[in-house]
Amino acid sequence: MILRIDDLVKHYGPVRAVDGLSLEIGEGEVLGLVGESGSGKSTVGKCVLRLTEPTAGRIELAGRDITHLSRRAMRPLRRDVHMVFQDPYSSLNPRFTVERIVGEPLLRHKVADRREVSRRVAAMLERVGLRAEMRARHPHELSGGQRQRVGLARALILEPRLVVADEPVSALDVSVQASVLNLITDLQRDMGFSCLFITHDLSVVEFLADRVAVMYLGKIVESGPTAEIFAGPRHPYTQALLSAAPVPDPVRQRERRRIVLGGDVPSPLDPPSGCRFHTRCPLAFDRCRAEEPALLGEGHPAACHLVTADSVPDAAAPPKR
Ligand code: SF4
Ligand code: MG
């Protein structure tokens, strides 16, 4: 197990960004963490990288408890875990050359001298589909897609065991999103790193993730193997997200019944009582407002009062009232 998160809580003052979340990622496994903006998914990534201090719970990286490690004690572990950010524009220092940006982790961890850095940066750039000449460029001389490739090269140059990718393609033009996603998939297969892939777009993880965890207002509402989630989503929220995702097959698209959710995601300042999804769920009933459903079910758990060992609700066919 490369990452194990137990009952993670992160509150920013009164904002309950993450409110009791557990997940695991195995060696070489890709977990897609999916949720709308405000669901707390980025906060989970930041806690794993120790960019923010968890309020409660436990985070283990490669068997080591890192929940409350000091910056100094965390430093050697930073070789093992790297982050790819959403916005390649702001995450790369504009004053530095590509060589300095990509090579910096090698120098910081003292694994290469200057000449060696230049050679290794060229090799890494090639792996992400960029020419060695790019080393002398600055971020503003690159396209968005090239910048995100530079971000990937920087994250991967130390061959980390875990990569946390937070919306790595959502700031890019649609036309380059697919190529960057394919690149991440290829690199993951070649290099074998584990990945926590954070996205608001369920369809993005279909071809990339081994398992998917769906987040709503600071909690996981469903998780399981990607193929199972896509073939048979159990939680009404997952069903709604999937019904809104485009499918390549127009026949399937027509057959699929769109589930339209009312309202916006409620504020994490004051999450709804009972099931946090009850204010938007087409199937909500009295019990949902009073009692919080537990995340139950071996291998493919869901947190909904209507999910049982032998039945799954259908949010596209709510009962007439
Ligand atoms: Fe909907 Fe109730 Fe299930 Fe929550 S517990 S998802 S409100 S049916
Ligand atoms: Mg975010």
Image (tube, grey):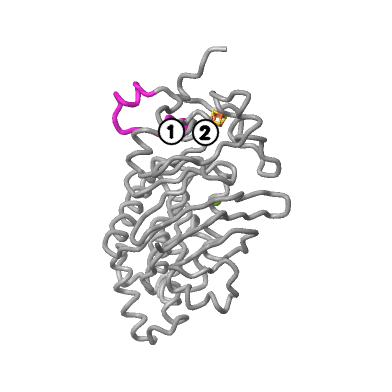
The vertical placement of 58 against 254, above or below, is below
> Left or right: 22 with respect to 233?
right
What type is the residue that disc 2 sits on?
Cys
- Please give the residue where the numbered disc 2 appears in the rendered image: 304
- Which of 214 and 258 lies nearest the eye of the viewer? 214
- Which of 191 and 219 lies nearest the eye of the viewer? 219
The kind of secondary structure element at disc 1 is loop
Q: Is residue 32 magenta?
A: no
The dominant secondary structure in magenta is: helix
Task: Identify which residue is drawn at 42% across, 32% down.
Answer: 309
- Which of 28 and 5 lies nearest the eye of the viewer? 5
Provide residue 284's location: percent of width, then percent of height.
Answer: 58, 25
The kind of secondary structure element at disc 2 is loop
What type is the residue that disc 1 sits on?
Arg
| Residue extending furthest toward the right | 14
Provide residue 184's location: percent of width, then percent of height.
Answer: 34, 56
Q: Quadrant of residue 321?
A: top right
- Which of 300 and 214 lies nearest the eye of the viewer? 300
Q: Is residue 243 magenta?
A: yes
* First of labels 1, 2 by sequence position: 1
Range shown magenta? 240-256
Task: Identify which residue is drawn at 42% across, 49% down.
Answer: 32
The vertical placement of 244 against 10, above or below, is above
Tell me, for residue 234, which label it has, or none. 1
Rendered-image quadrant of the N terminus: bottom left
